[in-house]
Amino acid sequence: MGTKEMRAAYADTLVELAATNPDIVVLEADLMRATGTGVFQKAHPDRLFNAGVAEANMVGIASGLSATGKIPFASTFACFASRRVFDQFFLSANYARLNVKLVGTDPGVTAAYNGGTHMPFEDLGLMRTIPGLTIIEPSDPVSCAAFTRLAAETYGCFYLRLPRKAAPCLYAAEEKFRIGKAKTLRKGKDLCFVALGSLMVGSALAAAETLAAEGIQASVLDVLSLKPLDAEAVLGEAESTGRIISAENHQIAGGLGSAVAEILAESGIRCKFKRVGIRDEFGQVGTQDWLAAHYGLTAADLVRTAKALS
Amino acid sequence: MTETRAGELRAIAREIRKLTIDEIGYLGVGHIGGAMSVVELLTLLYHEHMDTDAKNPRKKDRDWLVLSKGHAGPTLYATLALKGFFPLEWLHTLNTGGTKLPSHCDRNLTPGVDMTTGSLGQGFSAAVGVALGLRMDGSGKTVYAVIGDGESDEGQVWEAAMFAGNGGLANLIAFTDYNKQQLDGFTKDIQNLDSLEEKWKAFGWFVQRVDGHDFAAMDAAILAAKKQGAKGKDAKPSMIILDTIKGKGCDFAEGLVSNHNMSFGMDQANAAIAALDAAALDAAAPGAAAAKER
């Protein structure tokens, strides 16, 4: 099914939406070349606003725009979208019940050469505490485009966590997605990888393949929607396999691992459980592959974790 | 503005000031200082300049007010109640559980409040966003934004100032309530704002400075701001710096250094309200209040 840049899936979808919806506007904070919304600027020059290196103001302006009925998509690196403008996004957008779509690019180790200063391992933990916020991390270009569209069509604040780079398409173009619904990419009876984002879903699929060769049948659940989380799908896997491994390109505290632990602990279902993710460390520079290996996010790490849990 | 009209507005401002003192006094604590310094401004905006509809607060084609110094909410509530946006009785619910009148402005709770504010600096960015949205829609309406002088310490104010100045957002008329005091003391001692006019000019704004308790002067400044805003591609956003007095007209608060947030009860409130009435009588007919006392 090919590959496509995630940022192109995002930006192309916005161009398409804006062609029929005059309320779609895009805000950037001097990272348009990174986010790839230059195509939007070209198509709709009067609807792209560059705030300059002023993320707080960008989120405030997005909030004001949405109060007048516009549907603003504001993007910056995920480290700035979360740590730097948490209060602005929390109050001006979410607390005010406005309609702001905040896009954080380069999450976790995908920040690679930008290093520890730009490497958010905690953005999901921060965002999960905001009441009513929808948090989406697409796993491929198809889901990226679909959730960009859903975000535009659904009133309320969204946080979209997007790596910029090319990713393989896991879904057919016509696949339907829903907020709060995970997708089962692979069904197995022995354990389930509950994975978030293209990097970790990729690791989980590869790990499942390796395990299958050794007679261990693993499910792979593509979370997509961290909040609301598809508790039914997670608990279904917990019941049928008895072994859950969460996998995230993020701290194991506060993000997917915590969210899964919370619903498992409260469910009363007997289940073995392990979280894979960054274990209380800061980021650093390196290639994405080196960083993924360093922090234990690879398929090999998932295979090892699965065997230890058996 | 005629002197007769200014006199009418002074009378309305006195009502709003009294209602605000009563509103906070009934609760027993509140941001009296910064609430008093914006009374004349809000009176002028709602009774002379803004196109609003108390029966349809969210009507599409309206002027907007973003009170970015959200802690002056009680004055806005008194202003809106007097305009008929909601019953005057609501004023005694300020900050009580389940109220529609929280200490800081909330667009989802209070009819007529256009933006949720309170974390300083944020409302100003939102006001810029609203002005941008209205301009995109080709609306001829105006966004009025009010920031505090202490609030002007926030970097976000200047991010928004740069954006609006560069964008020529001429449908935005902002005011700085320059009462020279912030929570911890005088602004000159905490963070000096001197050359405030030059700062705003440097950010590309049309800047005026007037007495924020003088209706005729403020009215003339708003009219000049609108005239300037109609200049087409050269038009700029407007900043009107208002020289004001923190605690203005509330006898026990005015002149105090620590009047940002005060505890006071109805005895003090009623005395302050009586003093305002006496001063009004005295202004109408010198000696009348004293004669009435006797």
Image (cartoon, rainbow, N blue to C red):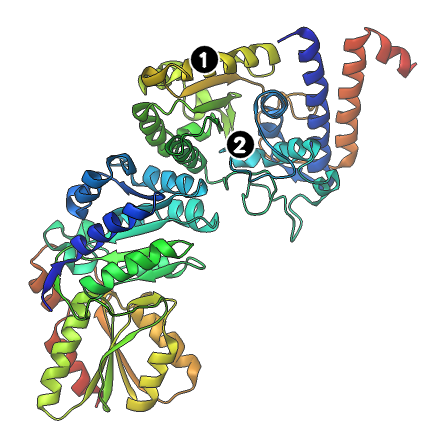
Q: Chain of mark 2?
A: B
The amino acid beneath tag 2 is: Arg
At a point 8% along the width and 57% down the height, the residue shown is A286
Badge 1: residue crowd in 10 Å (few <14, some 14–19, many ≥20): few
Is A170 in front, or is A75? A170
User: Dot 1 corresponds to which residue?
Assistant: B227
Secondary structure, mark 2, is: loop
**Above or below: residue B253 compared with residue B103:** above
Image quadrant holding the N terminus of chain B, namely top right
Badge 2: residue crowd in 10 Å (few <14, some 14–19, many ≥20): some
Find residue B62 and name its label: 2
Q: Quadrant of residue A6?
A: bottom left
**Above or below: residue A259 compared with residue A133:** below
Query: Between disc 2 and disc 1, whose residue precedes?
Result: 2
Residue B41 position within the rendered picture, expressed as x and y whole percent measured from the top left: 58, 22
Q: CA distance from mark 2 to mark 1?
A: 19 Å
Residue B49 appears left or right of B231: right
At a point 59% along the width and 47% down the height, the residue shown is B109
Q: Quadrant of residue A110?
A: bottom left
